[in-house]
Amino acid sequence: MQENSNYKILLVDDEPDILDFLSYNLKKEGYVVFTADNGKKALEVAKREVPHLIVLDVMMNEMDGIETCRQLRTIENLNDTIITFLTARNEDFTQIAGFEVGADDYITKPIKPRVFISRIKALLRRFKTTEEAGKISNIGDIKIDFDKYMVYKNNEEIVLPKKEFKLLALLSSKPGKVFTREFILDTVWGDEVVVGDRTIDVHIRKLREKLGDDYFKTVKGVGYKFEF
């Protein structure tokens, strides 16, 4: 059995040729693939199969991808499901709208099969990270000890203040996922007195200085994500 056969992927697009093309390439890699040609059917299949990843077209007639994603994110047992949009449109406002309703990433079509499979593998890596993570998480050359609030890079201890540690823990909990500024503020700072976007930027800058620029990616107009 191929390793990828453990992962279930739902493809949602109202163009049969695209469904067939993507499905063929994913199945060739060993993934378990389900398809839906509209948003309503996607909700039904997602509830039944609980896929690890949903590849969702934005422009669909019966229910567009933005609304489908919004409804998917209200289903409790799909909380850990990764959702990436697939669209021919590349406007910033469309991407921001997608992230605001809970999308994790964005793939622009047309796309070459090898590039598509590479993006899918990168998105699914976070499940391996989640499965392996416990009180100690090893991500790339970074080790996070959640019990002791300690961080190591290449086995060298890195001292982080509490807020920086919480921000790192949040972003690294789902590598590749874009966390909006609003979500970061709510999760890391909660009800604490007035902090703004600049506060997040300063903490990200400090994490980059201590752990390296490559881990922390800025998504313009939306927020940040952690990659390795």
Image: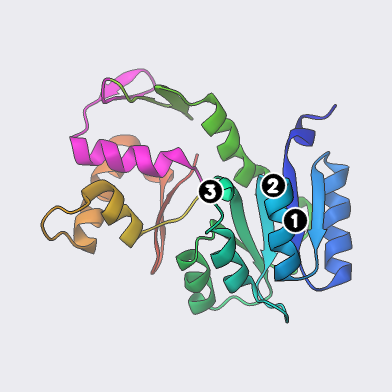
Amino acid tagged 2 = Pro
- Residue positioned 58% across, 72% down in the render: 66
- For residue 212, what is the image quadrant? top left
Amino acid tagged 3 = Asn
- Quickly name the residue at label 2: 51
Image x and y of residue 219, in percent: 43, 61
Q: Secondary structure at mark 2?
A: loop
Label 2 – label 3 distance at C-alpha: 11 Å
Foreground residue among 192 and 26 = 192
- Quickly name the residue at label 3: 79
Specify whether 155 is left or right of 140. Answer: left
- Quickly name the residue at label 1: 45
- Residue positioned 68% across, 46% down in the render: 50
Compare marks 3 and 1 and give the one earlier in the sequence: 1
Residue 20 tag number: none
What's the magenta region?
Answer: 148-176
Examine the rendering and report whether any part of residue 2 can be seen.
yes
Specify whether 21 is left or right of 144. Answer: right
Q: Is residue 96 magenta?
A: no
Q: Secondary structure at mark 1?
A: helix
Label 3 – label 1 distance at C-alpha: 15 Å
Image x and y of residue 220, in percent: 40, 66
Examine the rendering and report whether any part of residue 115 can be seen.
no
Q: Is residue 172 magenta?
A: yes
Amino acid tagged 1 = Val
Foreground residue among 47 and 195 = 47
Image x and y of residue 59, in percent: 68, 78
Image x and y of residue 41, in percent: 76, 65
Give the class, few, some or many, for how many residues have Cα within 10 Å of label 2's Cα (few <14, many ≥20): many
If the image is split into quadrants, where does the N terminus sit?
Answer: top right
- Residue positioned 38% across, 69% down in the render: 221
